Every structure is written in structure tokens, then in C-alpha cells.
Amino acid sequence: MTVGPVERDEATAEFFDGTAAGQFLLRRCPAGHFGEPAVAQCTTCGSMDLAWVPAAGGATLISWVVSYSRSVGDEPPLRTVLVIGELDEGPWWWAQLVGDDHDADAAGLVAGLRLRVDFRRAGDEFEAVPVFVRA
Amino acid sequence: MQDAGPRFWPAARRPVIAGLGMTELGKVYGRTPAQFAAEAVRLAAADAGLQLAEIDGLLTSSGVSGGISIDLQRDLGLTDLRLLSHLQAYGSTAGAMVQFASMAVQSGMARAVACVFADSPLKPERRAGAVYGTRRTPAGWWGMLGASGVVGANPMYALAARRHMERYGTTSEQFGHIAVAQRGWAARNPAAQLRSPITLSDHQESRWIVEPFHLLDCCLVSNGGIAVIVTTADRAADLAQPPVSVLGWAQSHPGRYLRRNPELGLVTGAAAAGPAALGMAGVSLTDVDVAELYDCYTFTVLVTLEDYGFCAKGEGGPFVASGVLGPDGKLPLNTGGGQLSGYYMWGMTPLSEAVIQARGQGGERQAAAHDVVLVSGNGGVLDHHSTLVLGSAAAAA
């Protein structure tokens, strides 16, 4: 399983409508400033007049770590690469980087690496969750 | 502005810490957070030489297991309080409580304010690491963060630390110097949970939690409670313990949690709160004899040292690896072992050790000079900061 289960609430309904359609929705004010999906007012100018606008999907790597699960029996720990990506529109997003060969650790990851937003679900009954893949 | 600071206030207004109460800490089972909190307040009153009924202010705070509220007044049988509130600013709370209590006694609103934190997240059948990773339900923004793999504080602090490593070349070995030094102090602290010496190799070979953090980069999880009592200098003069002056204080809450933040992992609220608190105290960094810094991770210590100005920005790695730390170094830092090796009572860990050091009651680990003690509190993911400057009885004279 790549991502865990998550359900929508009142605050995330529009956002998850977007992920279901393969879109990562950002908030944009009339002056054109982009903000993270969870912001309630523009982080640049304070405007409360925010529209949902799909991100283009491109991003660059800001930071990365490798999370280790607790070993169970003889099984090696499950490794997950977690990153902060800066979307090309400016906002940051904290999520998993999927599709990497985790046996090679996080070798080759370096700030500035190009990424792309993708989506995964834990199951049909759960919401689609944004993740990053290498561009 | 400096001569307006607490040092110059009349004794009837000047805040001091007169009592410290610490329950048994660590793997102590069978008690609720509220029970730990009540015991800590009783211990603090007894330590100060105060009757419990003389406490006229109570500030409560709780950790990951919750369970504490202003109902603690009833548990303690306190009546006719003149100040009562519950605070939550995460790891900066303990420092903040002392700040608000200091303002309360300065204004005359209250005369003796107990500030308490307690937590009992550890259960006999439960792993320590499970405690801090499972408190969010999988819904909404928080649920999505967890669903995408970013669960709990470990990966979030690791992502912040990686930026420091990338930008300044800071290494895991340098983090290790902090862990080793603090274990060296913990060996001299009977209240510390982990007292066996460790080496840099032990640090490097400890299992990954979230790379770049090894197990020995991460704090403990502890059960227990700690309380302090803030009163005025004139009241404390008749009490049992050497008074510890609250000379200066400040907070900083940058407010960019999970937002675009070019300073993530590079600069924290300590950069603003440190100089402000030192300025209020009328002292400079070179006057600081002992530093008790919030150490949820080794990295937190390193970046706080930079932000306070103990070394230049970006030079925290070489600084901590230079031999300056530990019982044989020239900077007494986290002298009780801190949260890494001592006990994890959020901001009460650095605060309690600061009070012990300022009093000169550190026993085997007592710093020779202890007139000015700098204390940090850090909460969220480097999002909330409190700084206290404490002074020994001699420094106030």
C-alpha cells in the first residue's frame, strides 16, 4: 500500500473533488498569488477572495527523508521516501515520493530535482491522495 | 529600555521561581496525567516551603495524552484562586506559563502561581514510538498528510533538518556529538532515564527512525509531571529555596506551518525570542553561564544554538563537534541529559534543569558558574518558541 486511507471533511471537499479528477487544486487570489490548498486567505496579500485553480503539476524538490517502519520478525523495515515539493506556482506540499527504488536509499535525491504531482488511493472507498513522482 | 526590565523592579513585583516539584519520571505506570500533575504541584509547594493553600494562581498544561484541565484546582482542593487557566503552545508552553505567571505576580493579580505539566503516554503494553504517531484520525487535511506518509513529528523535523544539512553541510556525525555530550551529562543525573555512556559510533549505528535521524537523535517518551511556583522576590525571601529570578522572557511564533517557508530548518523563532529575552534581562549572550535548550531532536539543539547566536548561522555543526559540549566542554548545555537522555516533559525538561542549576543544586553535574541560565522552549515543527532568562540568587543581589 502506497498511501493510507483518508476521508473528506467539510474543509477538504473541493480539494478531493479535484484529486478525484486528477487535479491538484491551489487557492488563487484576484491578484494572481497562489496559496496552499488549506489556506483561508492569501498568504501574500491577505485577500479572502480565493478561487480553486488546478496546478500545472510540476514541482521541484525542497527536502527529503527516508522513513523506516518498525521491523516485524525477519522482515526488513519498510522504507518510504517523504519529501517537500515546491509546486511551480510557488506553494509547498509535504507528501510521499513514490516510484523510487528505495533499496538504493534516497541516493540521487538533491534539492532542485524535478518532480511531478500524481495521485494514489488506499482503495476505491477512500479519497485520492496527492503524491510526488520523479518528472 | 534595559533599566525597565524585571531586574530593576521592586522586590514586591519582581518574579522569581521559588518551588520545583518533579514526580518520578519515565516508565512510571498506573497514574493518570491529572494525578501526576497534582503530585507535582504538591511537591513544588513543599519544595518552596509554601502551604498548598497559599497558592493563589494555577496554570495547567498537558501533553500528548491530554487529561489535564483547570479541574486540577478541584483535585488539589484549592479555593478562591485569583488566576486559573489552561495553556497550550506545545513545547513552548512551559516557558510561556512562567512568563504569564511572572506578569501575574508583577501586576499583583496573584502572589504565588503554580505552573504544571504532566503526561502519561507510555502504557506497559505499548511501544514508545506508537504514542506520538497515532493521534490523528484519517480525515481532512491532517488525514491526507498522514495518508501520504508524513506521520508524526519525526519525518517533519527530519525534513527540516535535511534542509540545514543541504544548505550548510551539517552532518549526522555532528548531530551525534550532541547526543553523546548529553548522555555524558545524564550519567551524572540520578533522575535521567538513560545513563549509560554512548559513543559517536553508537549514535551512527543506532537504527534509522527517519533518515537523517537515527534513534539516538530522537527524544525519549516519559510519564510524569513537573511543576514550578512563581512568586515575588520579597515573598520568596522567607521561603525554603534559593530564589531563581525570572530576568527576561520572549516568545516567537513564525506561523508558516506546512506553508511555503524558505526559512524551514534554517532559522527558528529562537532567532527573534532569544535577543528579545536577553535584552529584557539586560544581559548579553556572553553573560550566559548555562544553556538548557529544548531538544526534541539533536538538530533542534543545533539550530537553536545558531539562532541564539552561540555560533554563526550555518556553523552549528562544526561548533557542536568542536568539543565545546559535554561535562568536559566549556558550554554547560542540557546538563541533566535533556529530553534525549534525561526525561521528556516537553518544556519542563529544560526549565526544571535550569532551576536546579541556577540554585546550585546540580550535585555531580552542577555547573561552576550558574548566575545566568538561558532556557528555550520549542513547539510544533519549530513553529512556537519561548525563551526565558533565569538568574541565580547571587545574580539578583
Image (cartoon, rainbow, N blue to C red):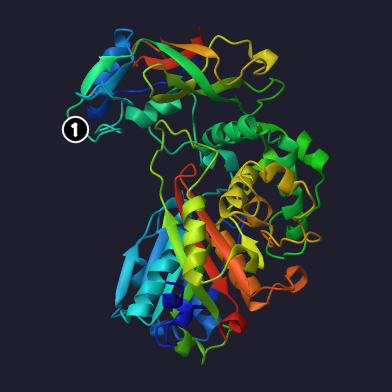
Locate the C terminus of chain B and report the quarter of the image it occupies: bottom right
Q: State the residue position of label 1.
A: A48
Q: Residue furthest bottom?
A: B238
Residue B309 at x, y percent in the picture: 60, 54
Element under label 1? Answer: loop
Neighbour class for label 1 at 10 Å: few (<14), some, many (≥20)? some
Indicate the chain on which mark 1 is placed: A
Q: Identify the residue at image location x=58%, y=64%.
A: B374
**B152 left or right, relative to B297:** left
Q: Write down the quadrant of residue A108 in the picture.
A: top right
Looking at the picture, which amino acid does disc 1 mark? Met
Q: Write down the quadrant of residue B14 in the picture.
A: bottom left
How many numbered discs?
1
Residue B342 at x, y percent in the picture: 66, 57
Q: Is residue B101 above or below residue A88?
A: below
Q: Residue furthest left?
A: A49
Q: Identify the residue at image location x=42%, y=82%.
A: B9
Residue B157 at x, y percent in the picture: 55, 37
Q: Nearer the viewer, residue A15 or B397?
A: B397
| Residue A73 visible in the snapshot | yes
Residue B360 at x, y percent in the picture: 68, 77
**A110 left or right, relative to B145:** right
Q: Write down the quadrant of residue B200 in the picture.
A: top right
Q: Nearer the viewer, residue A134 or B64?
A: A134
| Residue B56 visible in the snapshot | no
